[in-house]
Amino acid sequence: MAVQSVEPSTTSVDLGPAAALSCRECGERFDLGPIFACALCFGPLEVAYELPADGSEALRKRIEDGPANIWRYAPLLPVPADVADKPSLNPGLTKLVKADNLARELGVTGGLYVKDDSGNPTHSFKDRVVAIAVEAARAFGFTTLSCSSTGNLAGAVGAAAARAGFKSCVFIPHDLEAGKVVMAAVYGGDLVGIEGTYDDVNRFCSELIGDPLGEGWGFVNVNLRPYYGEGSKTLAYEICEQLGWRLPDQIVVPIASGSQLTKIDKGLKELVALGLVEDRPYKIFGAQAEGCSPVARAFKDGHDVVRPVKPDTIAKSLAIGNPADGPYVLDIARRTGGAVEDVSDPEIVDAIRLLARTEGIFAETAGGVTVGVTRKLIESGLLDPSLTTVVLNTGDGLKTLDAVAAGPTVTIRPSLAAFRDAGLAAV
Amino acid sequence: MSVTVRIPTILRTYTGGKAEVSAEGATLADVLRSLEENHAGIAARVLDDAGKLRRFVNVYVNDDDVRFEQGLQTPTPDGSAVSVIPAVAGG
Ligand SMILES: Cc1ncc(COP(=O)(O)O)c(C=O)c1O
Ligand SMILES: [Zn+2]
C-alpha cells in the first residue's frame, strides 16, 4: 500500500518558533511535518509561529548582534535555535545598493535601491529558501534533497546538500541555459533533465512524492514547501533593516510561481506586527516576462484566477506557466495598490544592459525582467518616482550569458599605434 | 468508458490508501461522479461548493492540464489517465 512516503513526525521536531502549519485558504491547522497541501481544501500550508516574547527593542538588538547572514533572523524562522552552528552555506545579508545612477536614468527621485541577491553563495536568492528547507529536511529525517527547478533552485539545492551532508537529485527542464546546468551538476549530486517545461517537471515531482520511488526524499519546493517559502521573508527583513528599520514605499519583485513575492509581503507584515518597523503603507509590484505572463494577464484583465500558459521567453528562471501562488500575488498587488506588469525579451536584454552600465550589476534575465518592468511602471505612472523604491535582482548574469552575448568593442594588436587607430584614445 | 485516476496522498484516506483507482465516465465531471460513488466524500475535496474545481488543485487528463482543455467538460476517452495533484509553488 503506497501511503504518504514519510509520516509527519509530530514529536521531537525542533523548528524553533514554528508551532504548526496552517492552511492559507481555510485556516485549518496541522502538526509540523513534511506536508504541503490542506487535506480539506488543497490550499497551501504555511508556517504558523509562536512569536518571540522579547519586546521590539530587545528583539532588534538580538537580530543586530546575530551572524551576518539570514540566521540573524532565526527567531522569526522555522529553524532550531542553534542553526548557525550547523553546516550551511549561510546565505543572506546581500548588498542593498543605492542606485543613484539608475535612479537618474529612470527619473526616480525618492531613492532607488537594488537588493542584489546575486551575491549569495550560488548566485541567486534560492540559497535563502533552500537553507531553511535543509533544516526542515534534517528535522524530518530525510537523507536525499530534491526539487523541481527552473535552474537556480537546482544549483542551490546541489550546493546546500553537498555542504550539509545530504545526497541530492534535482530535476530541471532539459533545455536550460548552460550556466545553470553546469552549476546544478558540479556539486556532485544527480541532475535529471526532463523533456518538457518546468510545469511538466513540477508535475512529475509531485507524483514522485506520492510514490514509493520517492520515499525518504525531501523535495524542497514540494513536501518541504511550507518551510522553504519562509526563506524569502528574509529578503523583506534585510531590506527593512538595511534601510534603518524602515519599510520601503515600493518593492518590485520578479514572479515565477509567486512564492517569493507572497513571502516578502508576509515578512513585511511580521515586522510591523512585532513593532520592528513603523506601520505605513507599502506597495508591492510583480514582474513577469511577456512570454510567460499569466499573472500579469490576470491582473490587467481584473481576474482573480490565473489561467496557465505555455512559456516562451529568454527569462527561463521565471518560466512557470502555472504559478501556484498567482492568486495571492494578485491579492497582494491589489491590496497594497501595486500592479503586475510584463516586458518583452528585447526589453529584458535592454534592462540587463541598463543595470550593468549604470550600477555595475550584472543581472540574469530575471533581474532584467524586474528592472524592465520598473521602467515600464514609471512610464505608465503606476510606480511613483517620488517614493523610496526597492528593486530585486534575484540572480547573476553569468548564468544567462547568451541573453546579452557580446564580444570586445574592437580587437587590436598590442601596440599604441593600433590603439590610436581604433579611435578609443583620449586624444 | 474506463479510466485510471491517480490519487494524491492527501486523498488516499478515501481510497483505502490506494494511489490509483479506476473510474468510469466520458468527461472529467462524469469521472468525478463515478469516483464519488465508490469513495464517498472525495468529490467535495476536489470541487468547491459551487461545483467548480478548487483553485489549488491541478487535474490532468493524459498529461494535459484541464484548464487548457475544457475544464470539467474535458473528454476522458477510454483508457485515459487522470491525475489529481495539489498546486505547488517555488521553482
Ligand atoms: C532568479 C529568480 N528570480 C525569481 C524567481 C521567482 O521565484 P518564485 O517562484 O518564488 O516566484 C526565480 C524562480 O525560480 C528565480 O530563479
Ligand atoms: Zn484548507
Image (cartoon, grey):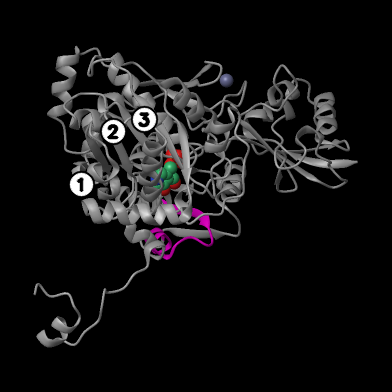
Quarter of the figure that contains the C terminus of chain A: bottom left
Q: What mark, if any, has residue A264 been given in the picture?
A: 3
Q: Position of residue A413 (x, y in %)?
A: 18, 88
Specify the farthest residue to the front. Answer: A427
Query: If the picture is divided into quarters, which one holds ligand 1?
Result: top left
Q: Which mark is residue A389?
A: 2
Chain of the residue under the numbered disc 1 shown in the image: A
Which circle's residue, 3 or 2, is located before the other in the chain? 3
Look at label 2 and name its amino acid. Thr
**What residue range appears in magenta?**
A166-184
Q: Position of residue A290 (x, y in %)?
A: 52, 47
Q: Label 1 near label 3: C-beta < 8 Å?
A: no
Residue A70 drawn in magenta: no
Element at badge 3? helix
Going 52% across and 31% down the picture, which residue do you hit?
A: A36
Q: Is residue A188 visible?
A: no
Measured from the top left, where is residue B24 in percent x and y? 87, 36
Which residue is denoted by mark 1 in the rendering?
A: A101
Give coordinates of residue A281: x percent, y percent. 33, 18
Nearest to the observer: residue A294 or residue A301: A301
- Label 1, ligand 1: CB separation under 8 Å: no
Give the label on residue A346, or none. Answer: none
Indicate which disc, 1 or 2, sits on the residue closer to the N terminus.
1
Q: Are marks 1 and 2 in contact (CB under 8 Å)?
A: no
Chain under label 2? Answer: A
Q: Type of residue at label 1?
A: Asn
Check disc 3 and give the amino acid type: Ile
Question: Distance of mark 3 from mark 1, alpha carbons?
Answer: 26 Å
Circle 2: element type: strand
